[in-house]
Amino acid sequence: RLLIPVSAPKMPLSLAWEERILTAKPGEKYEMPNVIRHLISYAMETGKWNPEIAVKRYLKEISEIEMEEMMKVFSEIREKAKKSGVMKVTPSFIKQICESKELKIDLNKLIVEFKGGGIISPCPLKFSKNEVTYEVNPSLV
């Protein structure tokens, strides 16, 4: 998920990466998620692929006051994805992370910031126990 088509054929305004299918047609436009821009920039500077630094740079860029707490959540999400190979998370899983780390953080705000940065993306039509599922950007795992 380094480059994502700007629009989805079936749902042009969709935020879900799954619906934005790469067709490689002439004139097709792509966007790079903010966190990926930081990831590639850091890799160009140092030769190292470091998702933790990329997420931290993104959160700093948006002046996120809960950056340290959000970094703890991101680290847990990343570890789960690395261990299980499953690139999906739910709000209840994120809430469990916050509770286990005793983080007092606005869950909705965290999800909005993570979606806005390209860290996660909603998965259409995939629900677990009637809640939305999010895909974790595999470039960050």
Image (tube, rainbow, N blue to C red):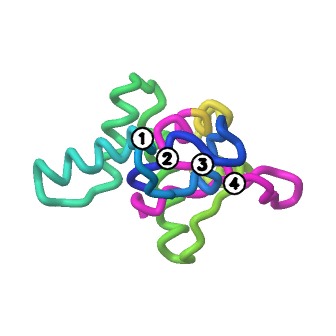
Q: Mark 2 points at which residue?
A: 5
Up the image or down, 69 lies above or below 139; here it is above
Q: Mark 4 points at which residue?
A: 123
Relative to the observer, which residue lies in front, 14 or 86? Answer: 14
- Label 1 or label 4, whichever lies nearer to me, is 1
In 3D space, how far apart are the residues under numbered discs 2 and 1 (Cα atoms)? 6 Å
The amino acid on which the numbered mark 3 sits, given as a three-letter code, is Ser
Nearer the N terminus, badge 2 or badge 1? 2
Contact between marks 2 and 1 (CB within 8 A): the answer is: yes
Q: What element carries label 2?
A: strand
Contact between marks 3 and 2 (CB within 8 A): the answer is: no
Q: Where is residue 95 in the image (x, y as percent from the top left)?
A: 69, 48
- Residue depicted at x 34% and y 52%: 52
* Residues packed near mark 1 inside 10 Å, few (<14), some (14 to 19) or many (20 plus): few
* Residues packed near mark 4 inside 10 Å, few (<14), some (14 to 19) or many (20 plus): some
The amino acid on which the numbered mark 4 sits, given as a three-letter code, is Cys
Question: Can I make out residue 141 in this image?
Answer: yes
Horizontally, is 25 left or right of 54 in the view? right
- Residue depicted at x 77% and y 50%: 132
Q: Mark 3 points at which residue?
A: 121
